[in-house]
Amino acid sequence: MIYSNTEPISGDSDNVLLAKILQETNGGGGGGGGGVGPQGPPGPQGPTRSPASQTPWAQDIDGNGFSLTNVENLDVNSALSALSITLNDTPPNQVLVTDGSSVMQASGVTITELSYLSGVTSAIQTQINTLTTAGGNYVLKAGSTMTGPLLFTNNAVAIGSSTFKASNIHLGTALTIWNGTSTSAAATLASPNDGILILANYTRSTFSRLCLGDDTATFPSLKRNATGVDFRLGDDSDYAPVTSASLSLGGDVVLERDAANTLAQRNGTNAQTFNLYNTFTNASNYERFGVSWSSNSLRLFTSGAGSGLARNLGIYAGGVLFLGADGVNNFWQINTSGHFLAVTDNTYDIGASNATRPRSGYFGTNLTVENDLINRGGTGFFRGSGGIALGSSDFVSLKSTVLGVLVLRDGVGTNFNRLQFGGTTSSFPSLKRSTTFLQARLADDSAFANIQGKLTTDANAVTGLVAGAAAALTNATITITDASGQVYRVPVII
């Protein structure tokens, strides 16, 4: 049904207006006056009904308003106190607009979308137009492109939140993070190539450190140091500890944790070398100490190159310095008094018979031998300016104070008994000292021993006859002395 009323209806009450509408929509003309009464005479033809308007009317008059159903066109020139219009062909919750013919119809805007304009105080487009930068670039929506910088103010802009997180942020050149309102303190993240990240200041001319967690002393950081990296505390007050089970340097030098409290340098089956430098100018000018494996032997050495010198090597211990060879036991020791001693008494040798022998041994005082002192011939000899002591309690010492003179004496150095030849029994002879006399005694000192050879006196024979001697028998004498010291002249023939 199409209803059209061009007469002003303002000022009519709701009931009067309803009656006039009902009268006209039912085809009535101008009957009726100031209220609802009997049907008047037929009036002019009312509005034409379309076929779709043949549906019966639904009318509700309750004294507070009225409703009309199946009305296609309705011109109202003044507001009513209450009016409810149901449009059956219109989607629910849509905003109504008029078209170019002033016909009311549903728009594409929902009531919810219209509510988004709540609180708007000025033209929205004008506000959008003012959202520009100094370069005239708009802040764009997601998916759009733009040129020039995107600037934020007041240090209060975040990308995403704890609830709505950004999955990816793509930057064409770099990301600069400023220190609050500072115009100079900033850090820049840039990527010059695939898989490469640069950390730098705003001008990309230097970098201080990367703090992990915070910039206080309770967190670590990585600090640039010329071409190296230092592990520092977050506030740069000290070095930070580094924990790692393995540290690879150059790919072929690897520091490993072998076990608890055990550091290892290893790289498969490749022999390793450790260099500790005294000086270093370059690879051709240095002084260093080295620990190296060579031909399955471990070497300790000092070396130098260029102007560097091969320095001395000292091995020191705060206590006893032990030497061992089986990886378990100690064989030799240098005690804190400087003495070189065998760890176990009478067990280990220096040199071997006819092989691996030391060439010479030089001693400042004594050479003490508990058993035998053997010279196997050749040009070898024993030499000791202080003497050579023989016996477990230094029974005899040999000493030479003058060239070609050998002194035999006891360990105290005040006496000497005898020199035995071949053995110690009465089957062997000996030479024995008795005060200022030298006696030929048996080796066990049980009796005198014979001496075979030529007897030479200490003085020449004296020419002349002994009194009472026959001149024909003797013509000279020699002098001998008995054990008591008595001197005798013995006649001899010259």
Image (spheres, helix red, strand yellow):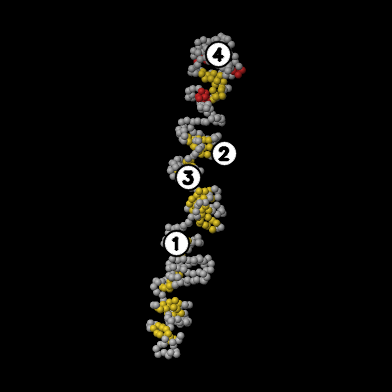
**Lower sequence index among marks 1 and 3:** 3
The Cα atoms of the two marked residues, 1 and 4, are separated by 130 Å
| Marks 1/3: CA–CA distance | 42 Å
Q: Which circle, 2 or 1, is nearer the viewer?
A: 1
Q: Are marks 2 and 1 in contact (CB under 8 Å)?
A: no
Q: For numbered disc 3, what is the local secondary structure?
A: strand
* Dot placed on the residue nearer the N-terminal end, 3 or 4: 4
In the rendered image, which residue does mark 1 sit on?
A: 334
Sequence-earlier tag: 2 or 1: 2
User: Which of the numbered marks, if any, corresponds to residue 231?
Assistant: 3
- Identify the mark nearer the N-term, 3 or 2: 2
Q: Amino acid at mark 1?
A: Ile
Query: Are dots 3 and 4 in contact, CB under 8 Å?
Result: no
| Disc 3 to disc 2: CB gap under 8 Å | no
Q: Identify which residue, 474 or 378, lies in the foreground.
A: 474
Q: Position of residue 343 (x, y in %)?
A: 46, 64
- Kind of residue at badge 4: Asn
In 3D space, how far apart are the residues under numbered discs 3 and 4 (Cα atoms)?
Answer: 89 Å
Q: Nearer the viewer, mark 2 or mark 4?
A: 2
> Given this view, does label 1 or label 4 mark the residue nearer the observer?
1
The residue that appears at 56% across and 54% down in the rendered structure is 269
**Residue 245 at x, y = what percent?**
51, 49
Badge 1 crowding class, 10 Å Cα cut-off, few under 14, some 14 to 19, many 20 or more, is: some
Task: Look at mark 4 in the image and give the residue it sits on.
Answer: 5
The residue type indicated by label 2 comes to Asn
- Please identify the quarter of the rendering in which residue 92 is found: top right
Classify mark 4: helix, strand or loop.
loop
Q: Is 21 left, or right, of 476 in this rendering?
A: right
What is the CA distance from the residue labelled 2 to the residue labelled 4?
Answer: 76 Å
